[in-house]
Image (cartoon, grey):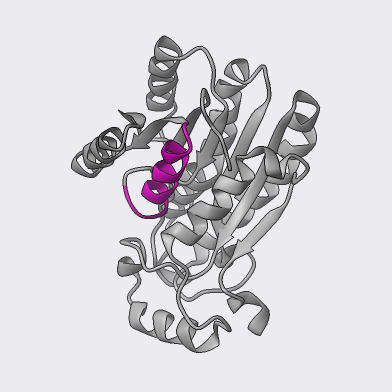
Amino acid sequence: MIDLQGKVALVTGGSRGIGKAVSQRLAAQGAEVIINYVRHRTNASEVVTEIETRGGRCVAIRANLADEASLDAMFAEIRSRYSRLDVIVSNAASGVLKPVTELKSRHWDWAVNINARALMLITQQALPLMSSGGRIVAVSSIGAVRAVSNYTVVGASKGALESLVRHLAVELGPLGITVNTVSAGVVDTDALKKFPNREEIIATAMARTPLGRLTTPDDVADLILFLCSDLAAMVHGQTLVVDGGYAVHG
């Protein structure tokens, strides 16, 4: 039994998809969850209501993680509410899906700032609240290590994220903070709907996944829950893949 009673967890991008599933999992095991969102206020409110209806504790805080002032304001609110932070799940992601010939420098900056730089800034802000140790989990994707059509800047930013996790693991390990990455396979969330070749991606994943189905947000949330628990005390600086075997199939 995983017991997160008394723990405080921050889940970025926690209002939909994988972030929503993670927020629900952590709350169900007793953690008080802070959901970060930027645009989907209604979705965030619905997640808070769902968690509270089930007896959990949850609050939603709006912040644009690409903007340092907005991130600073979010942590000012967190510090005003809590004296500690035990878990960080860096799940918020964004980016432009275009061929490389159509990309602009602003597309690069946006993807890298949201998908990689934000974790560095969040960690800096969170460290004073994690004096008793804790867990940091970043959410990545197969595009960090493999080429995916139209995924250039997002894939590059996810590769930077995975590298950042390894460096953070070396620095934060002596503080009792484990840092890991969960790399998800093809998950049919709202984000996938933005891909122009969505149907092709799903069909290919179904055909090439040995376990015969797509990865779900709950699958990813289960692995993140494990990494946030005492069961994963010696899992550190790793990228763990949850994809039903898709990545090993060539």
Residue 193 sits above or below residue 67 on the image = below
Q: Nearer the viewer, residue 124 or 209?
A: 209
Q: Nearer the viewer, residue 193 or 3?
A: 3
Q: Which residues are magenta?
A: 16-30
Quarter of the rendering occupied by the N terminus: top right
Q: Is residue 11 magenta?
A: no
What is the magenta segment's predominant secondary structure?
helix
Residue 76 sits above or below residue 118 on the image = above
Which residue is found at the position 58% from the left and 17% from the top?
Answer: 129
Residue 163 rendering spot, x and y as whole percentages: 69, 49
Q: Is residue 20 magenta?
A: yes
Residue 249 sits above or below residue 132 on the image = below
Which residue is found at the position 58% from the left and 84% from the top?
Answer: 210
Residue 113 rendering spot, x and y as whole percentages: 49, 42
* Image side of residue 71 versus residue 87, left or right: left
Which residue is found at the position 66% from the left and 58% from the top?
Answer: 240
* Image side of residue 229 versus residue 51, left or right: right
Residue 219 rendering spot, x and y as whole percentages: 49, 61
Q: Is residue 157 at least partly visible in the picture?
A: no
Q: How many marks?
A: 0
Q: Nearer the viewer, residue 213 or 15?
A: 213
**Furthest-front residue in view?**
1
Quarter of the rendering occupied by the C terminus: bottom right
Q: Quadrant of residue 73?
A: top left
Residue 158 rendering spot, x and y as whole percentages: 57, 55
